[in-house]
Each structure stands twice: as structure tokens, then as C-alpha cells.
């Protein structure tokens, strides 16, 4: 389970729990606060995670399959289908974009209503509103319908109602709730919670109006005359949501002892803090993916060929949008660093190649635009010559092998105690029958994790690679990530 999977599940569970807990309370304001805290849990958890963001010690992107060991003795899992993942993310982003566009459209519409409203006898009125409404967040204004004439007692109740919305900052809260629900547009529980919040908001405001001393009969009369809309999520208004129940509650309302607001907020803050600590403790750490290339970054390849007289020839290939870019350079010895770049479409693509003394080549592709690096990607390569009859990954028309049997990688107790995190890159040779015939560490981690990764992948069974439809032996890089609990 990834960090974002855990965040989504925790958020949905929090909303479900908030809906249950608020039913056990009597005070509408407290019920509203509890459910609001449940809805706002995702941003809190995300901030906690970002504040403690942990990246693997050697976060890399490799050309081949990715395996992960996220807990001691955890099962090693191959990353999911990237096309399916991309489709899911695209659908989610499309839903978020539609929801956010609707929010922006609502904000612009109500802003226009406020601009076009007229001041009549000291009151702001507009023919575009059907009930008394508060418009705006920074400088909220109460806008009354142009067609209604209230008695002095009714007008006092109406203005008290809308002023209570302003004091509670309900428009700001509504905007934040809408943004959270936009991110969870696929979850029906969030829609239920959003509607419940509007209902509880109005009940809490009803209590505030009556406790201010407004006449209950005048208030009920104002509600009956002016409420025409069940739910306005973009602005706070005199909603007719559950109007009959609210009117009965208003007429039977009695001032009763309530818990101090500070005490209610304290309990909610403590609950949210406890949830955030639990999530930060048990959820997967947010980390850079070691499996999939960032969207929009082209693939690239680096070959380092030893020369008979010494030195190496570097061959670089970058799959650019307008066609592949290839270049070569000669270095005398290792370790050595060489940079090769090209410009296309207003962007500069620079490949920095570093030859290590231990037989590795690290390639880093950096994309710059206007003198600023906008994206980057790194990969490890092995510069040693492949064995005879063994085709390296990346060979033209080579279909890579697929694992059909996996063995768990063991997180050593020493590494667990030291909380070692990072990746081990293992180069394996897979024969034409799908057996691992050789495995060695290209990028190691201390305290036995490199050997643990090798011991695991040696026992894997693969569907062999094919070249033009025929099974062949191939070299393959596996990346094993270790993340402590």
C-alpha cells in the first residue's frame, strides 16, 4: 500500500467515524465541529507527512522491474501496471478538475451578484438572490432579496442569522470543505458529510440567533417567507434544508448549559493530533517512486564500452519528442564525469554521466527551460560487457522477462534496529528457461540488506525474455527498496 492509498483510506474512515460520532452529540455546533474535523483530516495528515518527508537513501529510477520490501520479512511486490495506474490517476485528476472548475464558477457567479447588488435604505439588495445570503470571504456582505419586505422583528432575526454565519466564517469553511470534497469526488461518504455539514451549520446558527435574544416567532416567520433553496454550498444563506424540523426546534428552544467552545475545540484538536500521530507512525512514508519515470520525462540510455588501449567510449541516447538524440564521448579512465547536452523545442536536455570505479555508470537527465531545471531523472547502468549469448535489457525487439514466482526479501534485524532505508540494485542474469543463473549487487545498503536482496531474487522464477518471439537469456536490473516501519 502506498502513502496516498493509506491517506485516502484513512480520510474515508475518518469521515465515516465523524458521521457516527456526531450523531451521539446534542449540540449542533459541536456536531458540526466534529464532522468538520473529520473532513479536514486529509490536509492535516498530508502536512504531517510532508513535514517528515523521508526519501530513500538512494532513490533511483531503473530501466527494469521494481520490487519493494517495506517491512521486516515483508512480501516483495512487483510494481503495478503503469498504464493502469496512469489511467486511474488521469480519471481522478479529470474529476478533480471538473469539481474545482465548478467551485471557481460558483465563486465568480456570487462575486458578480455582490458587485451588481444595490444599496437600498442602508441594506444591500439584489434581485438575483432568493433568500438572505452572505457573499464573500475576506469582506463578506449580507445581500437581501429585492422582493421581500420584512417586519422589524423579522429583519432583526434575518440579520442576526447572517451575522452568525459571518462570525463563524462559514463561507471560508464551505470553500475548504468543497476543495476537500473535490479531491474525494469519487466517495459518496464525503458527499453525505458535506450535506450534513450544511444542515448542522444552519442548526448551529439557529441556536446562535435565539441565544442572542431574537423573537422565535419572528425568526420562524422570516425562515418560512425567505427560504427557497435547500442547499447553497458556495455561500451561507437561510437554507430551507430540514426546514420543518428546524422550525419545530426553534419554537421549542430553551437556553441550556453548553460545554465551553474552547473545551470542544480542545477535544477535537487532541483527536486530530492523535490521528495524525498514528497515521505518521503506521502509514507508509511518502517517498519518491523508484519504479516509474516521472510523467513527461523521456527515457534515455547510456553505454560505456571499454577500449582496447584503455579508456571508455560513452554512447548516450535520449528519446526526445522530435526523434532520438544520440551522442558519443571518450573518457580516459574511471572515475570520471562527462556532460552531453542538446536543445530542442526551447528545452535543454543534459545527460550527466558519471563512471564509478566499482563498475557502475550513473546517468542523470536534467531538463532545463529558461535557465531553470524543470525535471530530472537518474538511472544506474553496468558498464561491464554482457556474457556471450546474454542479451542486455534495452536490446531492440527484446521483450523483458516477467516474474511468475517471487520470494520475500528479509529485512535484517540489524538494519531494522538502525532504521536503514534505501534501495539495493541487483543485476540478475535470467536464462532462456526463466531461471536466475547469476545475481550480484550493483548498489548496496549496509547491515546485510544487499545480501538479503540477492538471496531473495536468486529464488525467483521468470517467464523468460523473448527476442523476435524466441526465449533468450538476458541481464536484468531489479531494484529492492527497504523502508523501516
Image: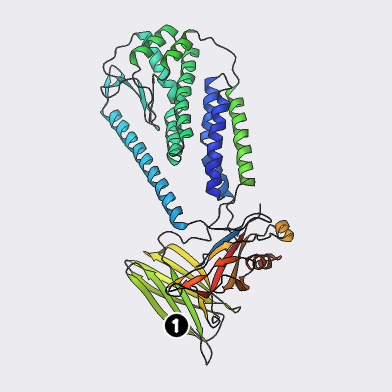
Quadrant of residue 123 within the rendered picture: top left
Q: Identify the element where label 1 is drawn.
A: strand
- Up-down: is 463 above or below 223? below
Image position of 368 (left or right of 407): left
Q: Position of residue 255 (x, y in %)?
A: 55, 11
| Image location of residue 218, percent across then percent down | 40, 8
Where is residue 459 shown, x and y percent of the image? 64, 66
Asked which colour scheme the image uses, the reply is rainbow
Residue 241 vertical placement versus 341 (above, below): above
Asked if 287 appears above or below 46 in the picture, the reply is below
Query: On the picture, is 330 further left or further right than 112?
Result: right
Q: Residue at x 44, y 82 (%)?
A: 329
Q: Nearer the viewer, residue 437 or 54?
A: 437
Q: Which residue bears the numbered disc 1? A: 329
Provide residue 5's location: percent of width, then percent of height: 53, 47
Residue positioned 30% across, 23% down in the render: 129
Residue ID at (59%, 50%)? 284
Nearest the viewer among 205 and 224 is: 224
Side (left or right) of 116 relative to 91: left
Q: Looking at the picture, does residue 81 appear above or below residue 173? A: below
Residue 326 in view of the camera: yes
Amino acid at each position: 500500500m502506498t502513502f496516498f492509498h493509506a491517506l485516502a483510506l484513512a480520510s474515508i474512515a475518518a469521515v465515516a467515524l465523524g458521521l457516527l460520532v456526531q450523531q451521539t452529540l446534542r449540540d449542533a455546533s459541536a456536531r458540526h465541529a466534529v464532522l468538520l474535523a473529520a473532513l479536514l483530516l486529509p490536509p492535516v495528515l498530508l502536512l504531517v507527512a510532508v513535514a517528515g518527508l523521508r526519501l530513500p537513501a538512494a532513490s533511483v529510477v531503473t530501466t527494469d522491474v521494481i520490487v519493494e520490501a517495506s517491512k521486516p520479512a515483508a512480501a516483495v511486490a512487483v510494481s503495478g501496471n503503469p498504464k493502469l495506474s496512469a489511467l486511474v490517476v488521469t480519471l481522478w485528476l479529470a474529476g478533480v478538475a471538473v469539481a474545482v472548475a465548478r467551485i471557481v464558477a460558483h465563486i465568480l457567479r456570487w462575486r458578480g451578484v455582490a458587485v451588481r447588488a444595490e444599496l437600498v435604505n442602508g441594506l444591500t439588495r439584489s434581485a438575483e438572490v432568493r433568500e438572505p445570503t452572505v457573499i464573500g470571504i475576506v469582506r463578506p456582505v449580507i445581500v437581501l432579496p429585492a422582493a421581500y419586505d420584512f417586519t422589524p422583528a423579522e429583519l432583526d432575526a434575518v440579520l442576526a442569522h447572517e451575522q452568525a454565519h459571518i462570525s463563524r466564517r462559514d463561507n471560508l469553511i464551505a470553500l475548504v470543505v468543497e476543495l476537500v470534497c473535490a479531491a474525494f469526488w469519487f466517495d459518496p461518504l464525503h458527499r453525505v458529510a458535506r450535506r450534513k455539514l450544511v444542515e448542522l451549520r444552519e442548526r448551529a446558527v439557529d441556536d446562535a440567533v435565539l441565544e442572542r435574544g431574537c423573537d422565535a416567532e419572528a425568526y420562524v416567520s422570516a425562515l418560512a417567507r425567505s427560504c427557497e433553496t435547500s442547499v447553497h454550498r458556495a455561500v451561507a444563506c437561510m437554507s430551507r434544508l430540514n426546514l420543518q424540523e428546524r422550525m419545530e426546534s426553534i419554537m421549542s428552544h430553551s437556553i441550556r448549559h453548553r460545554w465551553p467552545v474552547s473545551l470542544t475545540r480542545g477535544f477535537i484538536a487532541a483527536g486530530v493530533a492523535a490521528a495524525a500521530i498514528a497515521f505518521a507512525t503506521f502509514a507508509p512514508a511518502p517517498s519518491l517512486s523508484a519504479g516509474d519515470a516521472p510523467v513527461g520525462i523521456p527515457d534515455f540510455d547510456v553505454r560505456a564500452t571499454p577500449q582496447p588501449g584503455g579508456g571508455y567510449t560513452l554512447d548516450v541516447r535520449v528519446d526526445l519528442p522530435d526523434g532520438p538524440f544520440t551522442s558519443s564521448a571518450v573518457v580516459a579512465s574511471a572515475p570520471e564525469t562527462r556532460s552531453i547536452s542538446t536543445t530542442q523545442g526551447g528545452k535543454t536536455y543534459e545527460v550527466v554521466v558519471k563512471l564509478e570505479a566499482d563498475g557502475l555508470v550513473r546517468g542523470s537527465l536534467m531538463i532545463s527551460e529558461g535557465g531553470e531545471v524543470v525535471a530530472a531523472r537518474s538511472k544506474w547502468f553496468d558498464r561491464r560487457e554482457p556474457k556471450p549469448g546474454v542479451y542486455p535489457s534495452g536490446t531492440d525487439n527484446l521483450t523483458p522477462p516477467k516474474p511468475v514466482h517471487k520470494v520475500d526479501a528479509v529485512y535484517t534485524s540489524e538494519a531494522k534496529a538502525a532504521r536503514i532505508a534505501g534501495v539495493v540494485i541487483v543485476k540478475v542474469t535470467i536464462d532462456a528457461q526463466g531461471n536466475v543463473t547469476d545475481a550480484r549487487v550493483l548498489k548496496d545498503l549496509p547491515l546485510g540488506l544487499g545480501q538479503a536482496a540477492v538471496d531473495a531474487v536468486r529464488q525467483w522464477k521468470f517467464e523468460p525474455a523473448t527476442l523476435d518471439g524466441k526465449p533468450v537469456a538476458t541481464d536484468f536490473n531489479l531494484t529492492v527498496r527497504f523502508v523501516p516501519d
